[in-house]
């Protein structure tokens, strides 16, 4: 298990970081009905570090360096995104369901690794 991953809310710092650490904030869009009542699991370097619900954000503390982030719901995922974490700074990603209600069943069968989208947050 990777012990370098901790929830930002478990730390005493206002920005969710501790000395020598950086933070990653994942924000899920508030719109869309698909998956409305379900949380997306946040995986960093293959380890679940938190969950994010519709219209909410989750912040996790990470060691500096490059990390690989992916979201998961059941057997479906987002494409993997690489994030460079810098000590004392916060990187931000945003996410949501990838398609409209009409194409869900087909997408879950044929391309489960694109069921969700994950990208750097717009600045």
Image: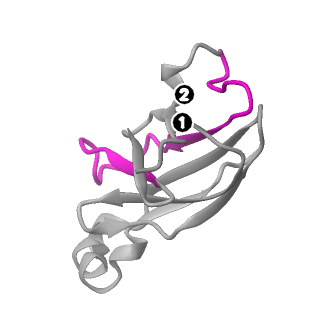
Residue 87 occupies quadrant = top right
Marks 1/2: CA distance? 4 Å
Q: Is residue 8 magenta?
A: no
Question: Residue 38: image x %, image y %?
Answer: 25, 45
Few, some or many residues within 10 Å of mark 1 (<14, 14–19, 20+)? many
Write down the residue under mark 2.
8
> What's the residue at 24%, 82% (across, down)?
109
Between 57 and 14, the one lying in front of the other is 14
Judge left or right: residue 94 versus residue 37.
Answer: right
Q: Which of marks 1 and 2 is nearer the N terminus?
A: 2
The disc at residue 101 is none
The disc at residue 60 is 1
Residue 98 occupies quadrant = bottom left
> In the picture, which quadrant includes the C terminus?
top right
Look at the image and give the residue range highlighted in magenta: 14-43
Between 33 and 72, the one lying in front of the other is 72
Residue 97 occupies quadrant = bottom left
């Amino acid at each position: 298990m990777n012990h370098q991953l901790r929830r930002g809310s478990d730390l005493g710092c206002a920005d969710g970081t501790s000395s020598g650490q950086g933070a990653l904030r994942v924000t899920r869009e508030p719109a869309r009905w698909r998956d409305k009542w379900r949380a997306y699991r946040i995986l960093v370097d293959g380890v679940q570090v938190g969950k994010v619900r519709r219209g909410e954000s989750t912040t996790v503390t990470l060691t500096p360096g490059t990390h690989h982030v992916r979201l998961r719901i059941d057997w479906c995922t987002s494409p993997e995104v690489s994030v460079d974490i810098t000590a004392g700074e916060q990187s931000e990603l945003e996410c949501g369901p990838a398609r409209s209600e009409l194409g869900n069943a087909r997408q879950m069968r044929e391309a489960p690794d694109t069921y969700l989208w994950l990208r750097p947050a717009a600045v």
